[in-house]
Image (tube, grey):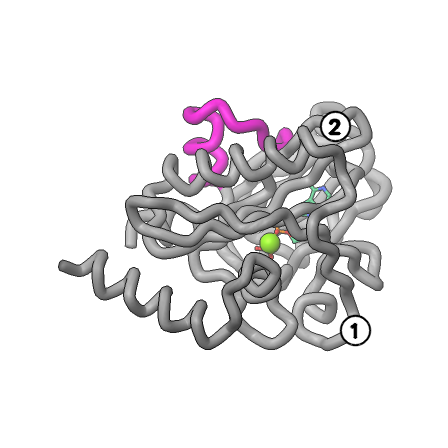
Amino acid sequence: MLASALAMDKVMSKHVFAQAGIASPAYVALRRGDQVDFTAVTSRLGPKTVVKPANEGSAIGVTISHTPDELPAAVEEAFRYDESVLVEQFVSGVEVTVGIIGNDELRVLPTLEIVPEHEFYDYDSKYIPGMSRHIIPARVSEEARAECQRLSLEAHSALGCRGMSRSDTIVDEAGRIWLLEVNTIPGMTATSLLPDAARADGLEFPALCDLLIELALEARR
Ligand SMILES: Nc1ncnc2c1ncn2[C@@H]1O[C@H](COP(=O)(O)OP(=O)(O)O)[C@@H](O)[C@H]1O
Ligand SMILES: [Mg+2]
C-alpha cells in the first residue's frame, strides 16, 4: 500500500531513489499556483525537458518540451491532471524496462527494450497493438542489462514493493542508467510489457496470473 502510494507519486519516488543512491533524471517540482521562473527551470535542466503530472500513469498529461518556449504550455497541460507537476531533464537513449516478481525471493525478468512508433512511449504506444515494439533482451551492452536489472531490484526493495513491480529506465549514450519510475501495478493487457518479459522467461500469461495471486495471498498471511 505504502509502496504503491510512494511509487504513484513521482516526486516522492525521486526522494526514495535519491536516498537509495539510484540515479534519476534531474527535475524541478512545481505546485499549482507557484510563480514559475521558466528561465531558471531551463537553465537548471537544459532546453529539452519532459513535463509530467506527479500522480498520473499511462503517460497521460506527459509532454516533451523540445525548446524553452514550449515549456509553459506543457506545464499548463500537466496541471490539468494534478496539482503537483514534475519538469524533468530529457534523457536520450534506449528505454529499458525490467519486471520483478516475488515477495521475499525475487525473480528478475529479462530486460525489455521499448521502441515506440511515436516520439516517446505515450498512451497510444502503450495500448494500441503495433504502436510499439518490445525487444527482449534490450539492445544494450551485457553490463548495462545487468545494471538495469540490479537497479530495478534495488528500487523494488527501496520502495518496499510486494508481488511485482516494473521499473522504467533509460540507458544513455554513455551507458549510464537513469531510473524514470517504478510501476507497482504494471499494465497486464495484451500489449503490456511485464507479461511479455515473463513469457520470454518461460512464464506464460495464465501461469503469471496464478503466481501473482499466490504471491498476493502469501503477502497477506
Ligand atoms: N526524462 C525523460 N527523458 C526521456 N524520455 C522520458 C523521460 N521521462 C519520461 N520519458 C518518456 O515518457 C514515457 C512516460 O513517462 P513515465 O515517467 O514512465 O510516466 P508514466 O507513469 O505515465 O508511464 C516514458 O516511458 C518515456 O518514453
Ligand atoms: Mg512509465
Spot occupied by residue 208 in the image (x, y as percentages of width and height): 44, 68
Above or below, 175 against 179 in this view is above
Element under disc 1: loop
Spot occupied by residue 38 in the image (x, y as percentages of width and height): 72, 35
Nearest the camera: 78 or 202? 202
Q: Quadrant of the C terminus?
A: bottom left
The residue positioned 65% from the left and 72% from the top of the image is 191
The residue positioned 73% from the left and 66% from the top of the image is 125
* Residue picked out by circle 2: 175
* Residue picked out by circle 1: 130
Q: Residues within 10 Å of mark 1 (few under 14, many from 20)?
A: few
The residue positioned 71% from the left and 45% from the top of the image is 50
Q: Quadrant of the N terminus?
A: bottom left
Extreme-left residue of the structure:
221
Nearest the camera: 148 or 86? 148
Above or below, 78 against 207 in this view is above
